[in-house]
Amino acid sequence: MEVLFLFSKLADLAFRALLLLLMALGHAVLAMGRLVWRRRSISHGSARWALWREVWWGKAWGGRTGLIVGKYWGRFLRFKNDGYALVFAKTRSGKGAGIVVPNLLTWPGSVICTDPKSENLAITGRARADRGEVFSLNVIEPELSDGFNPLDFVRIGTVHEADDAAELAHLLVTPDPTGKHWDSRAGNLLKALILYVCHRYADTPELRNLAKVRSLVALGWDGLQGVLEEASQMGPPSLRETARGFAGSGGTDEARSILSNADKATDLWSADRPAGMVSMTSSFDFRDFNRRTMSCFICVDEEKLGVYAGFMRMMMGCALIAMTRAKAEPAPKVPTLLMIDEAAALGRLEPLETGVGYLAAYARMVMVFQDVDQLERTYPKASSIMANASCKVVFGINDLNSARVLADTIGQTTTYSRSAGRSQRGAIGHDQRNEGEAESGRHLIDASEIMRLKPRQCIVFLSDAVRRPILARKIRYWKVLRWRGKWDRWRTGSVVELPRDHDATPPFSEPLENAA
């Protein structure tokens, strides 16, 4: 009997244990179901970082083609679609090492690059020379520079000459929102002088340049009267009409204001100044960049970026005009890369603002700004430029307003909060527990977190390929093994020799990385 009693007791305990186990499993299943429900709840937003498989499906992970915009899971993150890229990077955040230099080293087609400090030319010039001719428009060392004469763009004797001269005049005058009238009038005067120089000195190309236009402006209204009277009797009707409109108007306050703006716009191009020296004659034609592989670096001194911003504006503007004129030609196999570093220094470039849509087949643009605020100050249609950018890269932001804009762009995610409480009735009353759960929304990454990104982190948007933002890593070109020996040291210009073995110490005493 005792044995039977003991057996029944054990059976009862086993049954209770099994029941408790089933209850525990039931609770676990319910908990897992609740977690799954939580993951799928998007009542306050569904923002999240892109998954590896999404990046792979979007064909942005690895490969040999496309712009290099970051590193993800050990391989290059590439922008392979048509369109242009915006890079927001504060100073000293690694945009040169992570975006500019890697693409100059690897881009298989032609390249046109603005180059403050002449750093990019020093580092990548040899690598670009392996792909084709390399030119530099260098106001730092004008005696070593190649040349480009913007007046060569004016198609004299055609129906386009007046419009071509007007485009160059607009590039000369940096827009001022507070003085649109004076900018417009100064542009008209400069258009007339450009047409005059092109026709008057058609047989003397050494005088048909912006330095000559500058010398005419420097004559003042008294000296200009004879020039304008001569211009009113020559050239196309647009030149004669504009010249007659200005002839005899000297001495008025309006005329002095117009001439003052024209003087400010052309001061940079005096014959004895670097910009004037570099623009006397042309060593190449920007239209050839879509016909064969070539490279051009527009080099200015970083300390004089404000002084020579007009020079970069004119040269890059001419490059953009050349790309737009290429519409009548077959599209190149590889579009020309327009690497516009310090894009805000160029001011508002109308050919860029209006041509981003149809330039995609002929050029791939990368515009670098310090923050969103800088973009908005430069281009009135900044929101449209942001919205239409197929690729956006954030390297680091110091401006709170810019960080907020980017946080809103990334979006909100749904979060959960749980509350619990206990109340007691009387000294010996029963306890009463209250529990509750609530959903709320918050930014996937808020403005302060964007401003505190880790030094090696960057955020990449590839809207046409990957629908979610990508939390990626920055590239440091000197750590990529496959690029050893392709780049040179800046400042010294010494060639970095190929290591005899992979254990050789790199120039920066950091381990190398091999990325696909």
Image: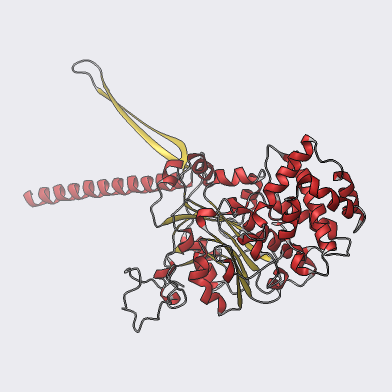
The percent position of residue 126, horizontal first and vertical second, equals 52, 76
Extreme residue toward the front, this view: 222
Q: Is residue 345 left or right of residue 488?
A: right
The percent position of residue 46, horizontal first and vertical second, equals 51, 46
Residue 293, image quadrant: bottom right
Extreme residue toward the bottom, this view: 500
Looking at the image, can residue 191 be seen? yes
Q: Residue at x 59, y 47 (%)?
A: 375
Q: Is residue 248 left or right of residue 61?
A: right
Looking at the image, can residue 350 be seen? no
Given residues 379 and 482, the one toward you in this image is 379
Q: Residue at x 46, y 39 (%)?
A: 442
The percent position of residue 176, horizontal first and vertical second, equals 67, 42
The percent position of residue 380, horizontal first and vertical second, equals 66, 43
Residue 456, image quadrant: bottom left
Q: Is residue 9 left or right of residue 88?
A: left
Given residues 27 and 135, the one toward you in this image is 135
197 relative to 255, above or below? below
Given residues 184 and 293, the one toward you in this image is 184
280 relative to 18, above or below? below
